Amino acid sequence: MARVAVAGASGYAGGEVLRLLLAHPDMEIGALTAGGSAGTRLGAHQPHLLPLADRVLEETTAETLAGHDVVFLALPHGKSAELAAQLGDDTLVVDCGADHRLNDPEAWSRWYGGDHAGSWPYGLPELPGARDALRGARRVAVPGCYPTAVSLALAPAVAAGIVEPEVVVTAVTGTSGAGKSLKPHLLGAEVMGSLSAYGVGGVHRHTPEMVQNLSVAAGRPVSVSFTPVLAPLPRGILATCSARTTASTAEATEVYAKAYADEPFVHLLPEGTWPTTAATLGANTAQLQVAVDADAGRLVVVAAIDNLTKGTAGAAVQCMNLALGLPETAGLPVTGVAP
Amino acid sequence: MARVAVAGASGYAGGEVLRLLLAHPDMEIGALTAGGSAGTRLGAHQPHLLPLADRVLEETTAETLAGHDVVFLALPHGKSAELAAQLGDDTLVVDCGADHRLNDPEAWSRWYGGDHAGSWPYGLPELPGARDALRGARRVAVPGCYPTAVSLALAPAVAAGIVEPEVVVTAVTGTSGAGKSLKPHLLGAEVMGSLSAYGVGGVHRHTPEMVQNLSVAAGRPVSVSFTPVLAPLPRGILATCSARTTASTAEATEVYAKAYADEPFVHLLPEGTWPTTAATLGANTAQLQVAVDADAGRLVVVAAIDNLTKGTAGAAVQCMNLALGLPETAGLPVTGVAP
Amino acid sequence: MARVAVAGASGYAGGEVLRLLLAHPDMEIGALTAGGSAGTRLGAHQPHLLPLADRVLEETTAETLAGHDVVFLALPHGKSAELAAQLGDDTLVVDCGADHRLNDPEAWSRWYGGDHAGSWPYGLPELPGARDALRGARRVAVPGCYPTAVSLALAPAVAAGIVEPEVVVTAVTGTSGAGKSLKPHLLGAEVMGSLSAYGVGGVHRHTPEMVQNLSVAAGRPVSVSFTPVLAPLPRGILATCSARTTASTAEATEVYAKAYADEPFVHLLPEGTWPTTAATLGANTAQLQVAVDADAGRLVVVAAIDNLTKGTAGAAVQCMNLALGLPETAGLPVTGVAP
Amino acid sequence: MARVAVAGASGYAGGEVLRLLLAHPDMEIGALTAGGSAGTRLGAHQPHLLPLADRVLEETTAETLAGHDVVFLALPHGKSAELAAQLGDDTLVVDCGADHRLNDPEAWSRWYGGDHAGSWPYGLPELPGARDALRGARRVAVPGCYPTAVSLALAPAVAAGIVEPEVVVTAVTGTSGAGKSLKPHLLGAEVMGSLSAYGVGGVHRHTPEMVQNLSVAAGRPVSVSFTPVLAPLPRGILATCSARTTASTAEATEVYAKAYADEPFVHLLPEGTWPTTAATLGANTAQLQVAVDADAGRLVVVAAIDNLTKGTAGAAVQCMNLALGLPETAGLPVTGVAP
């Protein structure tokens, strides 16, 4: 049994990590830490995690996190690097935040500001080459939720060279992606019954991460026009991704079938079936489908994930499994909760 | 490994049974059957059940169900009795429908019409005496979703005699409780943004089941005024139950704490915390809280369950575990999926 | 044309008052004021109020509100009394807050704390005697949203003496009733997919207002056991109200038909039809239906309103019409927005 | 007063037409007709339309519709042409269906099958040249809901030549756009908590209508890659539209500000503000915002409308106003219902 600490246990990402760890056969849950909520019961923040309801949250410090085999960091961006530096190299640190995702220090400065903390092995094992870098790693940068959906949707096409390297993405998401931030536009009364775009015009911070992933997969620069849309549901991302192509639907389907044939968590759906986020709720799965619009000359790929599971905490546990040498699928659900 | 068949696999109850069985360590999934959907892929109806997506639904007949150790029936009421009669006594038959829930043939005729098929051991192990009848049983009647919430909420109070035997219940529910019926009032556009009462004035068929359970628990007749309310969410029942009392909140709390001290799935929440259905989503749990309104002289008990899990399929699997002599909690989640 | 100011224009109640005033034939909109949002555009807070989008919010003070014929106060409780005292007696002040609803100073102190500001004519014209007190009034206390639904549902029965004076109410509501409060449990991700009870055991501050209204209607003390439930929708209250009766459904229906025969905004539905909140969305209407559960010996009355319209701002405008001597229905929608 | 009949009065489009007509100063509501629901009360289908609740639906025939000044047809596609042919040329016929939207008979045959019924003046007055054709018209083809949002979003840019004539659109919609169809994927339990794409790869029937509108506006062929997404809300379309550009955000903003400067229903939002569908709920308005993503070299335009109001029934009434020589804005709300 490995002993695990979770920093940021009162938030949505931390809660989902704990939900998955509770079902993991090889993990023992150690320290649970928080910022402003330190000293309160976990049950006050995560009433669904019954077995841990009476655990009291400790302060998030290097001391409370020390002495664990694995530490998950589910903290606001900019908070992980300093903490991680104080944790020994024998501890596996899995960062659910953004601090170590971007390879390019200039990109970091432009999009997040301040100094770059360096990049860690990138936690999307399904990307070409990524899995090997994760095996035995002691530091892992968990991808952003949008880049997960979009990279899974487009990497096979750009890698196979069947599309031009200019992609257009609209990704619709539930509101848990914004975390438990107390902002007026995230109130239930505002969210329900409404759709809204935000971060339009290429200004969302997940954009450079998509550019990075797809450019690596393509072996040449790929531009990404990305628009996120907020919709009235707690969880789920549905990404609609397209790019110019001269391929047929059959050719594109073959590329994707081959790319994901051996992946346990990425499913190309049967012809005529399209992804729904509900089918992935609580599961570490991605559902994909592709079609070529011959009139418009574009390949369209739709991907559905649960932003908190495959989009965050499930990826984190999947990478932990790889890093610790456990079976990659250990403890990870492949069935969703529906309806 | 026991081999299991599920009749009604394309519906919501059948889908939830399968979701739980997929995570059960001791079960092997055999025939999946349906009515009108026979011959189609399960994935077309239950896209969240990925490991079974390519299984083809067979016709619901005694022949297709024969030869399994366990058969779950998730069929419209009135359809179970005849099928069950054709299945051998060595087969465990777990009926998620209403046919065998009521003990009183007159009550059956009044509320459902037609002849009574007889009653089976009642699948709410947390009711006094119920667990013993379920151990080793070969026929089980799974309770209705509302009676589960309401009986868990009120049985301790009526059994302890701390309330008068006239209870008032308003239970709010998500729309999956109505099944996949193609009725206008269940369309998304009608349901979202609306609350509606139905079956008002004591005419809902789950009423006699509540009366039965509470009268048995009380040892005397209990009347139930029951109003169901439809709310815009897929899953969940929140039951608000009250009855006249002279007890204090502290006394009532003690009654409930004692009644459920050893129950793995029923949780009396800490003082000041009230149940939310999200905390039970996909879990086989019930969350309860009690308070006495001294001004009005009433005990108020609020119970939250997931109507498809503890309210149907989870109870079915829990009873199966008891009937087969497995650990009662085998394969049953106690953590919900939230937010 | 009367000139109107709205204090609290950035909130939900203030926004709904403005929405109705924009459609009112006799009103000119003057000062719009706020607390922390003073100095910002109204459009930033109420993007649906296009004709006023570029109006800048002023500070809520007696000075900015002075010089208007009508002032609506949509402020947190405890904030209205002092402001109103500084507005002349020739100004009509319509208080959407709680400060002047309760007649009994002791009840005020118990439920809200502090000194009682005195009571104003109570703004539910459909209550016996209430309409006359509102005609020509210069101060109006708009009822709470729950007391509106519950009083309309039960006043006829208690006034006619067809029920015992102990009533039980569960009222389900959308989240706008809580206002734009930045609290974790009101976040979209928490609210959607969940039902939760709160203020259980008779501790909700709207309880004494129901007791007051029903006791006045009955001419004797009436006890109210009230439980509010939060559901995932922006607007709407569905109140399920019951009390012991020996009357029949037909007798009860007659009582209600008579009570509301001439009311333009309260509709007893045809037999067999039950209220839905969607039918009242954005309308100043209440929909009611009654049934007697003979087995349980209880009258059940279900009422649906829009908590922001008939439950707050619509009632405010209706009372303004009465106070100013305008047609009571001026500017008030009787059709809802559905689906 | 003009006398109006509505065919398809039990559906969502017909209901919305009636809601608007009830608030129109110059209209008297005559025959209300339906197919399978003929003979039933309107209140059973449209409980929000209280003033018409007791009206009985007649059969949809030329006879019941005859003798009105205006006839609205809210019927499945393929049903309007034959009926309209039987209505006199002095009757204004406003067709909310698809039959007369496409100019090109071949496009009709390809996308809808069968013979083309001919095209009528196209009911989007904000398109260049469209308004004149609608004044005094006796036949009007109301646009599809998606083409309304997308054409308003992109026509100025393609007309001004600031984008390349290849546009990419993802439009997210509420479920009322599908009408009251009794299909499993439209059930509340399926829709809530889920996002799903459909009609992917350019196969949605609204695509040729967008191509037609934008090609006319551009004066050259425009290709449209269109993907619709279903989201959990009753009403609303949020369209994210993009195309390659070398213009700046300021230049694009100027184009749109000029294009819609005099339009009463189309609003370019202030800088930094993005459209939300809730702000348009029940209103005949469109909210737009534009931004250029310089990295990706694309103009992104986001448009929000209510699919039933500006997307269908509001446009129908707006066109009726033009055709009858009434003020274009008569009876049409510009404030939404929010939250």
Image: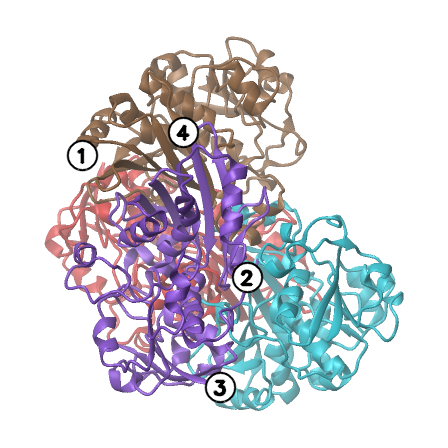
Chain colours: A brown, B red, C cyan, D purple
Looking at the picture, which amino acid does disc 3 mark? Answer: Thr
Q: Give the residue at the far left of this rendering.
A: B63
Which dot, 3 or 1, sits closer to the camera? 1
Q: Which residue is mark 3?
A: C249
Q: Residues within 10 Å of mark 3 (few under 14, many from 20)?
A: some
Q: Residues within 10 Å of mark 4 (few under 14, many from 20)?
A: many
The secondary structure type at the circle numbered 4 is strand
Q: Which residue is mark 2?
A: D336
Q: Is residue A55 shown left or right of residue C125? A: left
Give the percent coordinates (x, y) of residue B186.
37, 64
Task: State the CA–CA distance, disc 3 to disc 1.
Answer: 67 Å
Q: Residues within 10 Å of mark 1 (few under 14, many from 20)?
A: some
Give the percent coordinates (x, y) of residue C241.
57, 73
Task: State the CA–CA distance, disc 2 to disc 1.
Answer: 44 Å
Q: Chain of mark 4?
A: A
Q: Chain of mark 1?
A: A
Residue at (68, 81) in percent of width and height: C125
Task: State the CA–CA distance, disc 3 to disc 4.
Answer: 65 Å
User: In the image, which disc is placed on residue A248?
Assistant: 1
Q: Which residue is mark 4?
A: A224
Looking at the picture, which amino acid does disc 1 mark? Answer: Ser
